[in-house]
Image: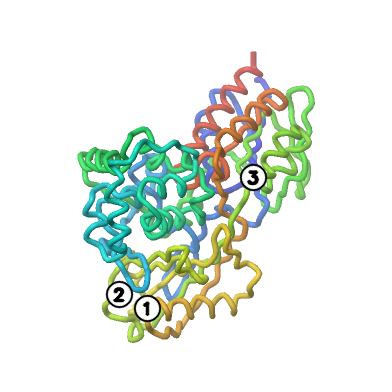
Amino acid sequence: MSEPRRVVVVGGGIAGLTTALTVIADSPIPVEVTVLEASHRVGGLIKTSPFAGLDAVDEAADAFLTRVPWASQLASELGLGAALTAPTGAHASIWHNGMHTIPSDVLMGVPAKMRSFATTSLFSPLGKLRAAIEPLLPTTADDDSIGHYIRKRFGREIHERLVDPLVGSIYAADTDTFSMAAVPQIAALTASRSALIAAGKARKSAAKAPATPIFGVPLRGMGALVETLSQRVTALGGNIVFNARVSSIQHTNNAYGISTSAGEFSADAIVVASPAMHSAPFIKTIDARASELLATWHHASVALITLAIPAQQWPSHLTGSGYLVPKPDQRWVTAASFGSNKWAHWRPADGSMIVRVSLGRDGLEVMHFDDEKLINLALADMKLHLGVDLSPTEIRMSRWENSFPQYRPHHFAKLAEIEHSLSVSAPGVFFAGASYRGIGIPACVQQARIAGESVAKHLATLSH
């Protein structure tokens, strides 16, 4: 029998682990797969831990989109399909001098009907009038900036109080400097003369699909997904090496030598599933131009504070799932999620409210503050927003430093140049993960599947 081909995956997050599973499960030839993880645990930006007497409260993403198939299919493949739960029907709000329920009939914040902005107190009469003329405006050229496009179409208020808070909260982004192409639902609207009419048609088309929950999560939290995934990878013969930070890669005779803090590894193919800013230094030894471009990626930092608020302190009228804060209104808090309203399984026995508060984003740095300062800033902002002093009985700090890649305008053109350069200088090196072609969990899983297929094709060429 021939020697098995060796595949190394750099990064043990959802993208890296799914890549490893795909290569092991689908390879037509014998393979040895090694996942190199720089930290002491798998999961990357996915982490779940006990809190306030509950076994599993997420410290980062608390769900994945189910209306695109990739994450749901992976959960089913791992035997977690029957264990998925969906959020309650609680509504979310925007805080702008008070709470305003997020209007219905919007597509990623873009109005899909006149009534989505005409009947809400979120906008001024002048802001509503400006938005109403959108269908009459000439076509707007796409310069790949969400903020620039939405302002030109609907005016400042729709952008600042609706689109930017919704998109910005997902990506920790400033939409003025964020690629339109990174949010396909909005990018698709630019093909039509009127964004409002196009959004309406898209919403109408989506409504024809069977009614299913938009989000899903295992009852044991998002951590159950990566935990089960890593167990499947190792059960199938994959090897996960912890505390293995890659320092350089050497390319000789169609093979690669990988130097790490845990020793030396060799590979016939490599999938880079680590953040761009961490990947740029070790890519430099195989492709200086690709490394130079990767080093230009920006990453935002977010602090997520989980609080347990006593039931008697929680205002009875706050029955929604949480709120977003538009940038002009932000001091430090960008969003707050009322977890016990949002998730039926996040309800402690003593009736406490689990609240998750986000601070920091692209352009709003918070990592230099210590934990006590961040907690005080969060509680002060929430007093302003909710009108009540909160005294948490339990607090958990989750720091996600440089964890949210920022897709600047023309991001994908830059990525295409990187991949073309590597295809010449280092065939058999591929990318997957949040820094590259989509930040959400389904997008990371999809990229991992494609990377696994690319590895298989590359190994097949080596076998001939």
Q: In terms of depth relative to the viewer, which is nearer, 238 or 7? A: 7
Q: In terms of depth relative to the viewer, which is nearer, 222 or 31? A: 222
Q: How far across and down, in percent of the image, does residue 54 sit?
A: 41, 71
The image quarter in which residue 302 lies: bottom right
Q: Secondary structure at mark 3?
A: helix
Query: Residue 420 vs residue 21: left or right?
Result: right
Query: Residue 261 vs residue 456: left or right?
Result: right
Q: In terms of depth relative to the viewer, which is nearer, 394 or 127? A: 127
What residue is pinned by disc 1? Answer: 386
Amino acid on which disc 1 is placed: Leu
Q: Residue furthest top?
A: 464
Q: How far across and down, in percent of the image, does residue 275 sit?
A: 62, 47
Q: Are marks 2 and 1 in contact (CB under 8 Å)?
A: yes
Q: How far across and down, in percent of the image, does residue 127 sit?
A: 32, 58
For the point 31% across and 51% down, which residue is it?
131
**Crowd tier of the residue under label 3, counting other residues whose Cα lies within 10 Å: few below 14, some 14–19, many 20 or above:** many
What residue is pinned by disc 2? Answer: 318
Q: Is residue 245 visible?
A: yes
Query: Residue 203 vs residue 340: left or right?
Result: left
